Structures are given as structure tokens and as C-alpha cells.
Image (spheres, rainbow, N blue to C red):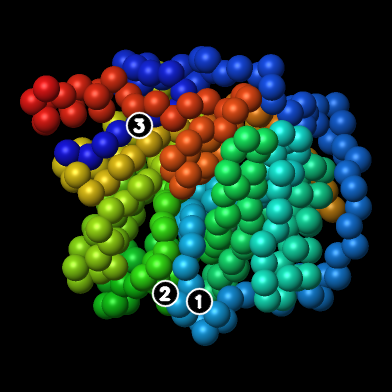
Amino acid sequence: MGTREVIGSGPSDLGFDIHADIDDSHSSPAPDLRGDPMAPVREVAIDPSAVLDFSVRSDAIQGREGNFLFTVGSTGSGKSTLQHFLVYWLHCDRTLNLDYASTEEAHVHDAHLNQWIQEFARGYLPERTPQGTLQEFRIGFSQKGRPRLDFSFVEISGEDIRSILPNPSDPMPRLHAQLEQYLRLQGANRRFVFVSDATANRRDGTGRVFYEDILFSTLIRYLLSERGVNLKKLNILFVASKWDAVKSDYRSVQAYFNTHFTQTRALVDGSSRIRASFIPFSVGDIVLAEEGGETVARVRAVDNTYIRYLVSWVYHSFKGTHLRGGYPRVARSLMGRLMDFARLGY
Ligand SMILES: Nc1nc2c(ncn2[C@@H]2O[C@H](COP(=O)(O)OP(=O)(O)OP(=O)(O)O)[C@@H](O)[C@H]2O)c(=O)[nH]1
Ligand SMILES: [Mg+2]
């Protein structure tokens, strides 16, 4: 039986209150952009030509060790937004010390991350990730009295992930070749964030019912099977993104995943090799703005609740200890504890 966790206070299966028990007293000032979409930030010179040319070479992946965070999900599910928000948040929280840890092409790597922070601060969401390219970023952060966490994460398009699904026109389903290389690294410590687009599962005829469930369960089977990547354990954070748009439709994030991810849940509940946590996620208040004849989504106000769940999970899952301040503790759900109780026969 798999281990299930929720972040914050339980008992999640009975209704998960995402706002419960968050102690804001030690946290950074919320980077609230409300009424000030062009919040001033430190300007950093960026050379656009350099920024364009930054993708991983296969020989640079060989033999790599360390912590790796893989954010996967379908196209447009919110993977890049989540990663940009994460970097932005780590920069904005003055209780955290953020460092970039790139070795090769450091200036281009760092320029990217600086640009993410600055764009996000202005309310701009990332562009869609181009298919075929994979970028790796290396960062580290620490908090007073807490050990530093160093980890790498990759930016990859949903197209290069959903190619794992069987397709009548392509007899060989496969992931992006370099993603596959990262996943198979011997010395890597892997964590996964599976991003579900909570606006894409509607049952009113506008949603792609069970599409993400099929994608996630196919990916999990591939990661665990001997014919696939053959990982011994999987530590996964399931994220229901764009929660701002659907939160009144569900009793809890558990109810969301139970409804739309029947096979993924069956895999998680049936395997002792999978450890899973579930959180809702949103960047905050999104508005559609007309810019240069185009409609673009902009963040009007950042929500500082969900991002703390994400940071807490990332830190705790790699370091096994909690951050202080406004970061919620990663708690076992009541259901998970009861399942252990039944399984272990206490
Ligand atoms: N309402 C709402 N919309 C969001 C949120 N996060 C992302 N979006 C919308 O979803 C779009 C796609 O997000 P991305 O982060 O680019 O998605 P992605 O998974 O990286 O997509 P690919 O790179 O194409 O695979 C954004 O441009 C926003 O319009 C959120 O928290 N709330
Ligand atoms: Mg993307």
C-alpha cells in the first residue's frame, strides 16, 4: 500500500482546509501586486540573444549526481508557471537565502532565472515551453538554522511528456530523449511534481475527462516497470493547478483527485513503492489583459498560501526536515495513518 501525505492539517480525505494552520508571523512580506502590477524590482541586464540559446547537451547529463526535481504534466497544465513562481518566491522570501548553482554557461543560466523573477514580479506568466528543448536549472536555498538544499530542475514542454502515450500514428511511444537520460541517472535523488490542470477535467463537456489520469498512470507505470525506467521508489507531489478557477467546485483537493484520477489513485494506493502527497496550487489572482492586440494572462496579486505548500514539500522531501516560519509541516493524512495501522497490524 502506498504512503499518502497531505501538507497542512488533515484529515484531508474528509475535507482539506488549505488555509488551516498557516502561521504567517515569520514569513516574508507577501509580494502582493494588487493595484501595482508593475511592482519595481532590481533591474538586471539580460542579453536576449544569450537567453535564447540555452539547452542541455546530452554529454553534460552523463554521470550527474545530486537532487533532481521533475515537473511533469500535459501541455499548458502550469508546469512552467509553477517553476517560475517557485524561483520568484525563493527570491522574495527574505527568510530564505537563494543561490544559483550553475557551473557551465553560468551567465546564461543565471540570466534566465533573473529574467523569470523580474517578469513574474511584473505579473507576466511564462511563454509556452517550445517542444524539443530541455533546460536544466540548478539552485540552492537555505534558512537560518536549516541545512541548505541544492537541487536541479528541468524545463520541458508537455508535448515531450505526453509523447509517452500510445498514439495510432506513432508506434513507439517515448519521452524526450534527454529527460529519459536524466530519469535513468544512477546517482540521482529524484522527486516528481505531477501537475494536473484543474480546469481541464470538467465534466460539463468542455473537459478532457480522464486524459490526465491516463497520462499520469502511464507515466507512473513506465517509471516503475522493468521495461521502463525501473525506479525502485517514487516520491510524487500531485498538484491541482489553477485552483483559483475551480476551488468552489470541489470539497477538497483529495475529492478532486479521487474524482478525476481513478487509475492514478489505484496505483498510488496499491504500491508500497509510491509515496504521494496532494496539494492545490494557484499563482493567485489572474486577469486577462489586452496587450498589442493580444489577450494575455497576467498575475494581479500573488497568493502566498499554495506556494508555501510547494516549498515545504520540496524541502522536506529532499532534506527530511521542515522549514520554519510560515511553511506548513508535511503531515501524514489520517487516511494514510489508518492504512498503515491496518497493514502493519499495530
Ligand atoms: N487561472 C490560472 N491560470 C493559470 C495558473 N497557472 C497557469 N495558468 C494559465 O495556464 C497557462 C499555461 O501555463 P504554463 O505554465 O505555460 O503551462 P506548461 O505546463 O508549462 O505548458 P507547456 O510548456 O506548453 O507544456 C498560463 O499561461 C496561464 O494562462 C493559475 O495558477 N491560475
Ligand atoms: Mg512550460
Query: x and y percent of residue 174 in the render?
Result: 34, 72
Q: Amino acid at mark 3?
A: Glu
**For the point 59% across and 38% down, which residue is it?**
146
Which of 45/219 is in front?
45
Q: Earlier in the sequence, mark 1 or mark 2?
A: 1
Relative horizontal placement of residue 277, taking residue 272 as reference (left or right): right
* Amino acid, disc 1: Ile
Residue drawn 53% across the image and 74% down it: 132
Dividing the image into four quarters, tell me where ligand 2 lies. Answer: bottom right
For disc 2, the marked residue is: 181
- Tell me if 74 is positioned left or right of 261 in this view: right
Residue 168, by quadrant, is bottom left
Crowding at dot 3, Cα within 10 Å, few <14 / some 14-19 / many 20+, comes out as many
Residue that carries the numbered disc 3 in the rendered image = 5
Quadrant assignment for the C terminus:
top left
Label 3 SS: strand
> How far across and how far down the image is residue 285, in percent?
68, 30
Give the CA distance from mark 2 to mark 3. 29 Å
Residue 160 lies, in percent from the top left, at: 46, 67
Contact flag, marks 2 and 3 (Cβ < 8 Å): no
